[in-house]
Image: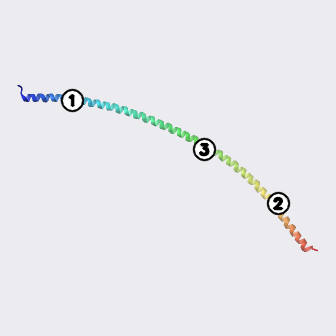
Amino acid sequence: MSDPNQEIKDLILALDKKLEGIDRKLEIQVTEIKSEIRLVKTDLEAKIDLTRNDLESKIQGARNELEAKIDLTRNELEAKIDLSRSSLEVKIAELSGKMDGYSKRLDQQEFISRGAIVALVVGVASGFIKYLFFSN
């Protein structure tokens, strides 16, 4: 029979070999998993970058479209304001002309009224003088 110590040594050597094999397999699997993780990470980063670029371009397009609409609306409003302003200036000029006409008419009526009052005062005064001095 063989030596029990030798058998234990043989068993330990066999176990060491199996453990080394398992260690190698685990290292290989860990390396494979790490490489797969790197690939997935790279793929995800590429997809994220693509999505980010796509979103940025969509946002920029929407911003440009919105700015164009704002500019168009601003231009339309400025045109309407200018049209209203010129219309108001014309109406103000018309009203100013009418006011000048009314002012002249009022001046003429004041002149006529003064003349009528003077004639009335002269008539009353002459009647009063005639009554006082030339009464029968």
Q: Is residue 83 left or right of residue 25?
A: right
* Residue 135 position (above or below residue 115): below
Q: Which residue is mark 2?
A: 112
The quadrant where residue 34 appears: top left
Q: How far is disc 2 from disc 3 in space, using C-alphas?
A: 52 Å
Q: Position of residue 51 (x, y in %)?
A: 42, 34
The amino acid on which the numbered mark 1 sits, given as a three-letter code, is: Ile
Which numbered disc, 1 or 3, marks the residue that appears first in the sequence? 1
| Closest to the observer, 29 or 103 | 29
**Res. 22 mark:** 1
The amino acid on which the numbered mark 3 sits, given as a three-letter code, is: Leu
Q: Position of residue 113 (x, y in %)?
A: 81, 62
Residue located 27% across and 30% down the image: 31
Residue located 41% across and 34% down the image: 49
Q: How far is disc 1 from disc 2 in space, using C-alphas?
A: 130 Å
Instruction: Point out the residue furthest to the right here.
Output: 136
Q: Do the residues bearing badges 1 and 3 touch, measured as CB atoms within 8 Å? A: no
Q: How far is disc 1 from disc 3 in space, using C-alphas?
A: 80 Å
Q: Which residue is mark 3?
A: 77
Residue located 83% across and 64% down the image: 117
Q: Position of residue 101 (x, y in %)?
A: 76, 53
The amino acid on which the numbered mark 2 sits, given as a three-letter code, is: Ile
User: Crowding near pointer 3: few (<14 within 10 Å), some, many (20+)?
Assistant: few
